[in-house]
Amino acid sequence: MRVAVVGAGGREHALAVALARTTEVVVTPGNAGIPGSVPAPPEDLDGIDLFVVGPEVPLVEGLADRLRARGALVLGPGADGARLEGSKAWMKSVLAAARVPSAAYGSFGADGVDEALAFLRTLSGLYVVKTDGLAAGKGVLVTESLAEAEADVRAKLAGVTFGEAGRRVIIEEGLSGPEVSLMCVCDGQRAAPLASAQDFKRVGDGDVGPNTGGMGAYSPVPAVGAAKAEELTEELVMPTLHELRRRGVDYRGVLYAGLMLTPDGPKVLEYNVRFGDPETQVVLPRWSGDVAAFLAAAAAGSLGSAEAPQFDRGAAVTVVCASEGYPQQPRTGDPIAGLETASAVPGVQVFCAGVGPGVGGSGLVTAGGRVLNVTAVGDDVPEAHARAYEAVALLSWPGMVVRRDIAAAV
């Protein structure tokens, strides 16, 4: 089997490594640090048995539909199912129809500023303001300040901060409890949970600063073992999948549930329609089975005949190394030092995300916000944490940004 991974970041590098255990892999467009990267667009590739689409934008724009129309096998929902991530308002309507627990909310467009502010003032304690459209994981404000929330609503609805993606907002009540990322592989009728993970969204230690695409992650989450993951899948993900099917959506891809384990029970914060980033970087290194065969079975609608995913008893931790100025205005073009020595630390794999070729093709330089994902495996989270930070200490470029508390409290 020959598999094409679509995307250009650390998630796609991790997917390529996991798939390459049993099959030939190409990555489109990939990047200068991912072996097997090809510049051709997915539609121009020949001899591909399975496409695995990494990012959300091409899914929302219908890439999976175009590939399937050519007879290709694709892991990734069509544009209809991708609306779960493309529109948070539509996602909320699906959750309500499926009777899946979620936060109370209101949805407001650009002409509803006064109504949005009035709704905001009915809430108390914690305010959550989200862009309706795609914002690369950065479109969520969580604050205890009513004034900050009001200013954010005005800026988003005016198109100042996130353009058209923010000209409709979702305002939610704040929830409390530990967060969990649960990725499920779906074949249209069934959903198979992968190992649990938890990511760290804020740019600074102690969860301060603006939201990012993710500064690190670890797996598994102690409170969510295999049995609990199955329970959450049956309680939250399967009703969602059934509601999608009722609406005529044949969802074949990853349904990634961002959950909060509240005192009132688990609730869905959001759905993503693809493998998480950086959660993939801690989950896939722990997957001991044939990843390619399992994803192909899901894409073909036949998970019932596939062997369930198996994860080792160890743990994994990923630390994201980012460019100076991330997430607002990342600086690029700086030479990356220490990649080979960091990769040689026992149990460590460095996944390349925002990288480009150095001058004359020598080495790599920073070419994006999140540059490298340093992933370490170990017998438990503390061992994986220690290995990851040992490798991070060997990497450098001017202004490198790293959180020092990823999985430190586990």
Image (cartoon, helix red, strand yellow):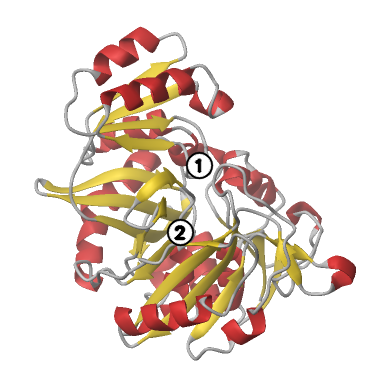
From the viewer's perspective, tell me whether residue 131 is left or right of residue 102. Answer: right
Label 2, secondary structure: give it: loop
For the residue pair 252 and 382, the one nearer the viewer reads as 382
Residue 331 drawn at (x, y percent): 67, 51
Work out whether mark 1 precedes mark 2 in sequence or the reverse, and give the earlier one.
Answer: 1
Q: Is residue 54 above or below residue 87?
A: below
Residue at horizontal 73 percent and vertical 67 percent from the top: 335
Q: Residue furthest right?
A: 360
Write down the residue under mark 1.
82
Residue 310 drawn at (x, y percent): 36, 80
From the viewer's perspective, tell me whether residue 172 is left or right of residue 2. Answer: left
Q: Residue furthest left?
A: 263
Label 1, secondary structure: give it: helix
Q: Which amino acid does the dot numbered 1 rest on?
A: Ala
Q: Is residue 263 above or below residue 377?
A: above
Q: Residues within 10 Å of mark 1 (few under 14, many from 20)?
A: many
Residue at horizontal 51 percent and vertical 81 percent from the top: 391
The answer, for residue 19, to whether it is visible in the render is: no
Write down the residue under mark 2.
215
Say which quadrant the N terminus sits in: bottom right
The residues tagged by marks 1 and 2 sit, at their Cα atoms, a distance apart of 24 Å
